[in-house]
Image (cartoon, rainbow, N blue to C red):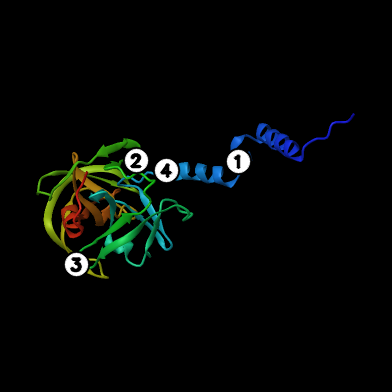
Amino acid sequence: MRRSVSPFRTAWRAALALVLLLGWSAALGPDARAGERGQDRASVVVHGGDTLYSTVGRCTVGFNARSGSTMYGSVTGRCAQGAGATWYADPALTVAVGVTAGVSYPGNDYAAVRYTDTTGSYPGEVSLGSAGTRDITAAANPVVGQQVCHAGRTTGYRCGTVQAVNVTVNYGGGIVYGLFRSNVCSEPGDIGGPAFSGGTALGIIAGSSGNCASGGFTYYQPVVEWLSAYGLSIY
């Protein structure tokens, strides 16, 4: 006598065969794949010196800081002005990581990005490109004669000396007060990069004169002012 086959058993065997053929995540459907996407987002890391993107351009993060458990990144005010509210970790604008928390320009040249993606990582280190990373554990105002190094997206990691403090610069579109200047060269694209002395944050690149072929100067927005304005601390 022919034995009847349960429809339930047939469906289960088909599902098992699909698992063996395609692998568990493909057979388990959308929920499993969503979990994998969550793991991808957890791998997002934004250091000082890295780039954030908006619908109108990109800005370099100077330093990361925090207020309690909330993390922030610094960018220049000129770069953030008109950039929109949302910031992304990728140029395709698919991984949103933060929102603009405040912009100060002219007068000052800084802005704060509040990180909203709690699955991401925002370490206190700054990226030096091929030179690796530098752990930043404190912040201070610069002193004339002090060594200063900076990391620019265009010209990379360079060091020199603080030459002047409390400098005023007219960008044409606005005047900025209280900057400091070094004899380290920089070029377009370096704006926003972190400037530091050892493990102490000093400022972010705000502008320059000259270039790295013939020599030049770089101007920086002091980081202590930014930290004070938003009640933040380096970690």
- The percent coordinates of residue 24 (x first, y second) are 60, 35
Disc 3 or 4, which lies upstream in sequence?
Answer: 4
Work out which residue is located at the far bottom of the displayed protein and give it: 173
User: Label 3 belongs to which residue?
Assistant: 107
Amino acid type at circle 1 is Leu
Task: Give the SS element for disc 4.
Answer: helix
Residue occupying the point 58% across, 47% down:
30
Amino acid type at circle 4 is Ala
User: Label 4 belongs to which residue?
Assistant: 42
Mark 3 nearby-residue class (10 Å; few <14, some 14–19, many ≥20):
some
- The percent coordinates of residue 198 (x first, y second) are 18, 39
Quadrant of the image for the N terminus? top right
Question: In this picture, is 160 found above or below 75?
Answer: above
Task: Give the SS element for disc 1.
Answer: helix
Left or right: residue 169 compared with residue 121: left
Mark-to-mark CA distance, 2 and 4: 22 Å
Residues at discs 1 and 3 in contact (Cβ within 8 Å)? no
Residues at discs 3 and 4 in contact (Cβ within 8 Å)? no
Disc 2 or 3, which lies upstream in sequence?
Answer: 3
Mark 2 nearby-residue class (10 Å; few <14, some 14–19, many ≥20):
some
User: Label 2 belongs to which residue?
Assistant: 129
